[in-house]
Image: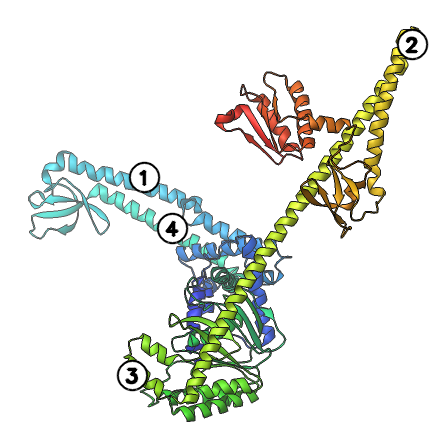
Amino acid sequence: MQHALQVLEYDAIRRKLAEHCETALARQHAAGMDPLFEPEAVWSLLDLTESAYRLLGVAVPPSLGPVRDLRKQVIHAAKGSVLGGQEIYQAADSLAAMRAFRSFINTRREDYPLLWNIAEGLADAKSVEERIFDSLEPDGEVKDSASATLAGLRRKMIATQSRIIERIQSYCTGKTREYLTDPIYTTRDGRYVIPLSANHRGKIKGIVHDTSGTGQTIFIEPEDVLQLGNTLREVESAEREEVMRILADLSARLGSVALAFEQGVEAAGELDFILAKAKMGYADEGILPLRANKACADITSGRHPLLDKTKVVPLTVTVGYEFNGLLITGPNTGGKTVAIKTIGLLVLMAQSGLMPPANGMRLGPFSQIWADIGDEQSIQQSLSTFSGHIRNISEALNGVKAGALVLFDELGAGTDPAEGAALAKAILEEFHSAGALLVASSHYGELKAFAYNTPGFQNAAMEFDAKSLRPTYRLLMGAPGASHALKIAERYGMPKHLVELAREGLSSEQQDIALMMEKLELSQRQARIAQGDADRRVSELKKLEDKAEKKLAEAEEIRKTVYSKATDQIESVLRDIRREAMQVFDDVKKSADPKAMEAARSHLKGLQEIGDELASQFETTRTKKEKPVELSKGMTVRVEGYTQIGTTLGDPKDGLILVQMGMLKLNVPVDDVSITQDKIGEKKRKPNVTLNRAMHAVSEIHLRNMRVEEAQQLLEKFIDDAVLAGIPSVRIVHGKGEGILRKVVQDYLRRHRSVKSCRDADPAEGGQGVTIAVF
């Protein structure tokens, strides 16, 4: 099976996955990744990938990049070794990254239990990492703050160093300057020296550390500088000892968590590896396969994972459901090899816990994968192409298990066509009887007939555009494909007379079969185009239906809103009439004037008539739904919300009835229709108060220079009247001023349930001094 991984370019998948890893250990896992062939093991891998995929979809976890594989060094520290400052700091950095990731998953452990089972193994040694960070710089240098002793020694070093510089400079600028060959100081073996002229030897006491090449200059360390230098050396020695003591202490602290560190690094590598699979899934637009209960693969719009996803032609293929053998035929350069490799790679990816780039995939894990693809010629082993293929096929035959996926490219090629076709049929039958699932490509007509006539096998074809003489790289299931060899030869410059000579060399039966295959391909292509056009039209029709339903729902909502507001207003007017009647009645009781009493009675009578009329209308409106009417074709009816009389054009159906009012035909709810004795063309003789207001509604109101309370009252009445009148939009003129009225108006409009939108008017219409409201 290693040969199958090689020819399917599985190594490229490993390298691609490694690019998404943050840690060296995860990259090692990617480099050594192999597909699994036990179903439960495969689903366990995919479950982990699914958890990581869901996690990345809702949150960005802390990076595991700082985790370095320092397990050996930390184990040595546990045994007493002193590590370098940089190694200690990197180990602490690793601990911090582990702890951050562990805490991140811990807060989500109920949603991602599979990831938590691994993240629980990440080290949590906050005190150790904090002590290290307090003591070391990122480059491993020990900080002054690591200990009070170290801070004191370094202060003393700086002071001593400063005194040495000050003293040595005095020799270069004072009266001794004339004894020097150059008024500068330098160092020899870490000691500060001055260039004394050999002629003045003895003029300055000290130790000679070097002599110039000519002997004219000696480099001397003055005696007083020497004493300061010795003091500096002592302080430096003490500083080094203190640094080593601190590093030893930090190493011991790190060694105390060696076991947790070792387990944590392994857990971090595993988590990074799993997350890399999910990241690759996002990058490739991959999917998680659905489970099938037997070895099979059903791929929808699968894409070769190593090709440019913007250019590759998706492949839809099934093997292992209704048939176990698929024979792919078609022209050379038509994409048969790519199709076979795509199937193999997508299966390998899924069985490695990766997300294959496809729109859909159902998988029953295969027990093995065998492949024989490409030119197997080997000069070193004295193998021809045919011999190389036979060696690989024989190896697969000797080791194949039931449920294996076997991939053959150009089966039986490289030898005599008749013998090759016969051998290919025997090979296919043998693998099929062993319980393997096969995908093979071939040019042999005999194999096309074999796949057509043999139960368990099916033909498939790589589509070829006969007009452009170019392959489309689309795989068509269910029919064999023509090779188009002569047409392709002609397209690539073969002389026409040679092509015609070759065509004449074909038997009439072969020519008939070739023509039949070409016509079948054309018919399939036309059928697919027609199906695509039909699907598109169905989709457009569905969108139009959805849009119409949405519009009807909006209209019904508006109708309900208007009905509700009208009912509220009728009730409000009735309440006002009752209050006014009570007031008049009280006045009558208090007055003894006959004229006043007569006027009051007349007023009460008028109020009573108005109240009775409104009450009657309200009761009719309120109880209409409780009194279903028996409607039928040809009745004279009134429709709620309309003043015009109409005629029913049919019987009720699904709660609706078709009514004609003038030139208008409407499908309206049965509950909104009432039988009337009025004549067509007439309107109600006594329109109610609400309808009167609606009839006299206007589309513009002026509120400039009004107080807020007054403007609010007028605005509410104006908007209600406009809604009831069915006016589509209105203009509210409030002026610019300080913007107070503008804000009050627009706040009210945004809260109003009948207002769809509001905006400032265009500059030509008044700009910010006018607000436009749309219902």
Q: Earlier in the sequence, mark 2 or mark 3?
A: 3
Q: Whole-Å distance between the Cαs marked 1 and 3?
A: 99 Å
Q: Secondary structure at mark 2?
A: helix
Q: Earlier in the sequence, mark 4 or mark 3?
A: 4
Q: From what the image shows, is residue 615 above or below residue 142?
A: above
The residue positioned 51% from the left and 53% from the top of the image is: 62
Q: Position of residue 575 (x, y in %)?
A: 82, 25
Q: Whole-Å distance between the Cαs marked 2 and 3?
A: 126 Å
* Residue bearing mark 3: 498
* Amino acid at pointer 2: Lys
* Residue bearing mark 1: 159
Q: Secondary structure at mark 3?
A: helix
* Amino acid at pointer 1: Ala
Q: Residues within 10 Å of mark 3 (few under 14, many from 20)?
A: few
Q: Is residue 2 visible?
A: no
* Residue bearing mark 4: 141
Q: Verify CB contact (< 8 Å) between mark 1 and mark 2.
A: no
Can you tell which of label 4 and label 3 is closer to the viewer? 3
* Residue bearing mark 2: 590
* Amino acid at pointer 3: Leu
